[in-house]
Image: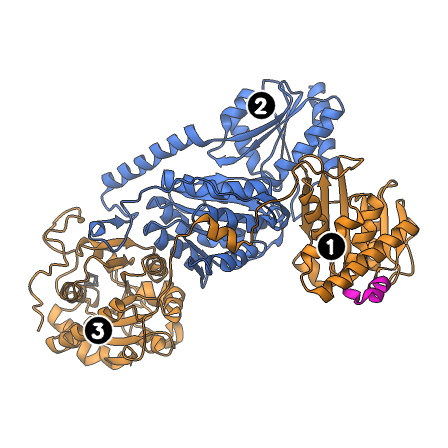
Chain colours: A orange, B blue
């Protein structure tokens, strides 16, 4: 049997991280924490895992666990130890990450973080110290406080009506698929300690082999807040507490499970460039679009599904490739759920101020609501191109120069109504003089890799171009 | 290598170029594309990406990874940043480097998903508990978002501090070209970090100092660092006339709009100068003091009812600074801002 009463090599010789009284722990006499710390330290030392071990300390009586263990340590915010441990474990795939938490920390304020770390099957071992009371803050009700047990905030005893039932965390966690080992042990008598030693050793071995998540609930005595003598407190666990929280191994899949490897790599720029699909520029930096104005402001609008956003993106992309300043701004979120979509594109010779377009130089309206909404905002020298396949009535308060373009019909003739946006692209390019037909065709050839799709789009862009030449 | 991307994607590409190791986040409009891009790029490259169970979980995973010496980031929008604030205080207290993006939306409460700049107090003045500061970068374009994202990781390492990138729904959702190249970054040695070597056994990352004197000394150390950051890192873009008739000021999306306003005014024969802070903390107060001579009117524009303007006024004691703000998700129109500037000039002449 492990010698429980000798100082473990995994502990500091003197507790230098402790501000005062560096020979003794901060735990009260008879507290279960001290015994548990000792068992963990012995098993870490026995398995030779001290260097790999990283402790995540909680807020609660375990807050100063780093006083004792000579291992890298971090203190988490209240309830967040399992989340912090997730970050530690992901960053240190070879570590033994230990999250040491009490019942307020894990079962109340941090339940969500605890459950989700378990459910992801993080490579970590969680010690859940259940002494069914808030220790450090002075004996308040915990989620684990027994029915009728008194506490600083349940002076007449825990009431089911007011406080609900004591929470059985180990059973909850064991109900999840991911965890590898889930158990409840005690540190209140030699028999329970022997079992705790076995379970804790197994948990550490699972971590060493990276076999996933381990949850060990430890029934621990808090003589101070239970207002019992240490001996009496230990007996109370056997007589009362373990009736609510039975000891046992609820789940042990260590034999069936393999190592879970989660990479954490640093990569060179080339790998990033590959991943982003970047290709070396072959563009001519001097190439520009001749524009009469400093800036052309476009609004593209229509139904969702008419390819409005990608039409704007094609204009922006082609302009960018010709070294112009460009911005593209979509309508999004709730605005889009109503079925209308629009985007604003600005192409400029110099830095663009607002990307929002209120008074477009060019409006493309592919449906009636868009024309009604944005048409009147186009100034007298602006262009309004509307989809005459779908719009039969034009508002009479329009000032801009109005073009009727049967975009949907032309697209359908080209092969699919989906290409209506590309019909518009051809029309707009011709009318604004921004791109030649050959530029458009080269761009489409870059965009549509599938030959059948490319063919349809080439027809569509030509149809739009021709329509513009004819009007 | 030019690529047309949304501001939200530019943040992630910048992070990759800066050598970011891990992303932890939770979806929220209008910041979600950051998580989309991070999941798309980080996982195939063998980097860490976790969609956390909540914002609080995400920031604490950041805490864990940062204490392990990783370059790490998270992103959200106002309501999510509120939730992260506890963790940000701990990060500042434990002096952990990390990058946090806030794509501002409309508040208070659920508000809506349009652009606003109303998280200024929360992000720039603290938000979390305790006497701490965090560096705040305020890009005004997608390209600048990309560059600041790279730089944020260096600043975080250099000062062992959380660094915010403060954008908004418009900057996050809009696309502009960015020029992606390999850059030299400055990843600090982190001998204090938690790892699996014997040398790290004595390392401890914490923000707790029980002894009052120890705690006071810790806070004083933080504040001498903050003083150094204030002296060395404050930055602003200045654009326009050397001797202005009027000074325009704003950050982020409104800052770039004011550039067009300055151009418009200059066309009408009014000399206008734009001061656009690129760091909000530290605030470039000196720049204001150098440029704004007594009697020159200042128009401060933001997408809020007046948060940023308080820092402008603090930088210019006794000076007349007029605030103009739009809220609710609305962006001001150019003409509207020109009109405000003209009105202010008129008032100044009458004074
Ligand atoms: S209060 Fe209870 S749990 Fe905390 S140290 Fe004392 S006995 Fe242990």
Q: CA distance from mark 2 to mark 3?
A: 70 Å
Residue A286 falls in image quadrant: top right
Magenta-highlighted residues:
A408-418
Q: Which residue is mark 2?
A: B319
Q: Quadrant of ligand 1?
A: bottom left
Q: Residue at x 89, y 50 (%)?
A: A469
Front position in the image: A49 or A190: A49
Q: Residues within 10 Å of mark 3 (few under 14, many from 20)?
A: some
Percent across and percent down for residue B206 are 29, 49
Q: Residue at x 39, y 39 (%)?
A: B186
Circles 1 and 2, Cβ within 8 Å, touching? The answer is no
Residue in the image at 42% along x and 40% along y: B185
From the image, tell me which residue sits under label 1. Answer: A311
The chain containing the residue under callout 2 comes to B
| Magenta residues, dominant SS class | helix
Instruction: Work out whether disc 1 and disc 2 sit on a shared chain.
Output: no
Q: Residue at x 46, y 48 (%)?
A: A269
Between B56 and A278, the residue placed more toward the observer is A278
Is the CB of the residue bearing disc 2 within 8 angstroms of ligand 1? Answer: no
- Residue A202: mark: 3
Structural distance between the alpha carbons of marks 3 and 1: 60 Å
């Amino acid at each position: 049997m492990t010698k429980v009463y000798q100082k473990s090599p995994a502990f500091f010789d003197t507790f230098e991280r402790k501000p005062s009284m560096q020979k003794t722990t901060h735990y009260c006499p008879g507290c279960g924490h001290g015994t548990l710390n000792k068992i963990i330290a012995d098993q870490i030392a026995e398995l030779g895992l001290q260097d790999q071990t990283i402790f995540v300390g909680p807020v609660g009586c375990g807050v100063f666990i780093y006083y004792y263990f000579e291992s890298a340590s971090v203190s988490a915010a209240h309830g967040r130890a399992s989340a912090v441990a997730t970050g530690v474990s992901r960053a240190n795939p070879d570590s033994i990450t230990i999250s040491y938490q009490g019942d307020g920390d894990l079962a109340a304020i941090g339940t969500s973080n605890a459950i989700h770390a378990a459910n992801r099957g993080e490579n970590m071992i969680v010690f859940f110290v259940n002494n069914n009371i808030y220790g450090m803050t002075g004996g308040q009700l915990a989620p684990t406080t027994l029915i009728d047990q008194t506490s600083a905030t349940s002076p007449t005893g825990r009431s089911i009506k007011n406080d609900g039932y004591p929470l059985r965390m180990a059973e909850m966690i064991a109900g999840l698929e991911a965890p590898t080992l889930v158990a409840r042990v005690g540190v209140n008598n030699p028999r329970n300690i022997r079992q705790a030693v076995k379970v804790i050793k197994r948990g550490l071995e699972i971590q060493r082999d990276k076999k996933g998540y381990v949850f060990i609930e430890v029934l621990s005595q808090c003589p101070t807040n239970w207002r019992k003598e240490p001996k009496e407190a230990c007996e109370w666990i056997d007589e009362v507490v373990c009736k609510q929280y039975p000891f046992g191994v609820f789940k042990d899949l260590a034999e069936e499970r393999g190592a879970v490897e989660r990479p954490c790599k640093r990569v060179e720029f080339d790998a990033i460039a590959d991943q982003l699909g970047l290709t070396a520029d072959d563009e001519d930096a001097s190439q520009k679009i001749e524009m009469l104005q400093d800036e052309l402001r476009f609004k593209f609008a229509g139904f969702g599904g008419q390819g409005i956003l990608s039409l704007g993106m094609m204009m922006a992309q082609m302009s960018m490739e010709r070294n112009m300043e460009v911005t593209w701004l979509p309508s999004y979120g709730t605005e889009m759920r109503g079925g209308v979509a629009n985007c604003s594109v600005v192409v400029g010779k110099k830095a663009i101020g607002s990307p929002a377009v209120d008074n477009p130089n060019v409006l493309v309206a592919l449906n009636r609501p868009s024309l009604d909404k944005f048409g009147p905002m186009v100034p007298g020298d602006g262009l309004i191109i509307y989809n005459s396949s779908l719009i039969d009535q034009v508002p009479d308060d329009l000032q801009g120069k109005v073009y009727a373009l049967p975009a949907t019909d032309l697209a359908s003739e080209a092969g699919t109504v989906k290409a209506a946006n590309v019909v518009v692209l051809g029309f707009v390019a011709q009318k604004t003089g921004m791109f030649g037909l050959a530029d458009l065709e080269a761009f489409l050839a870059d965009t549509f890799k599938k030959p059948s799709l490319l063919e349809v789009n080439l027809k569509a862009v030509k149809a739009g171009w021709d329509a513009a030449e004819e009007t | 290598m030019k690529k047309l991307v949304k501001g939200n994607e530019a943040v992630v590409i910048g992070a990759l170029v800066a050598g970011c190791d891990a992303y932890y986040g939770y979806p929220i409009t209008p910041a979600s594309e950051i998580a989309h891009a991070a999941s798309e790029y980080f996982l195939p490259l063998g980097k860490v990406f976790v969609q956390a169970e909540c914002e609080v979980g995400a920031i604490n995973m950041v805490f864990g990874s940062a204490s392990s010496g990783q370059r790490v980031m998270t992103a959200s929008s106002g309501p999510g940043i509120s939730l992260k604030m506890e963790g940000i205080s701990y990060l500042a207290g434990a002096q952990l480097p990390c990058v946090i993006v806030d794509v501002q939306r409309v508040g208070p409460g659920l508000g809506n998903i349009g652009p606003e700049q109303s998280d200024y107090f929360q992000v720039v003045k603290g938000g979390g508990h305790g006497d701490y500061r965090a560096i705040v970068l305020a890009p005004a374009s997608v390209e600048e978002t990309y560059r600041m994202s790279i730089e944020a990781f260096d600043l975080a390492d250099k000062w062992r501090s959380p660094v915010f990138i403060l954008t908004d729904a418009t900057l996050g959702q809009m696309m502009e070209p960015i020029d992606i190249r390999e850059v030299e970054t400055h990843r600090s040695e982190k001998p204090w970090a938690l790892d699996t070597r014997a040398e790290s056994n004595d390392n401890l990352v914490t923000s707790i100092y029980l002894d009052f004197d120890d705690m006071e000394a810790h806070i004083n150390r933080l504040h001498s660092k903050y003083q150094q950051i204030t002296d060395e890192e404050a930055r602003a873009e200045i654009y326009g006339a050397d001797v202005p008739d009027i000074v325009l000021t704003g950050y982020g999306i409104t800052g770039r709009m004011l550039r067009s306003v300055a151009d418009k005014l200059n066309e009408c024969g009014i000399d206008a100068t734009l001061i656009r802070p690129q760091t909000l903390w530290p605030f470039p107060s000196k720049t204001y003091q150098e440029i704004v001579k007594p009697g020159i009117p200042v128009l401060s524009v933001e997408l809020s009812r007046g948060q940023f303007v308080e820092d402008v006024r603090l930088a210019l004691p006794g000076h007349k600074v007029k605030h103009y703000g739009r809220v609710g998700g609305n962006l001001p129109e150019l003409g509207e801002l020109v009109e405000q500037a003209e009105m202010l000039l008129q008032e100044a002449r009458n004074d």
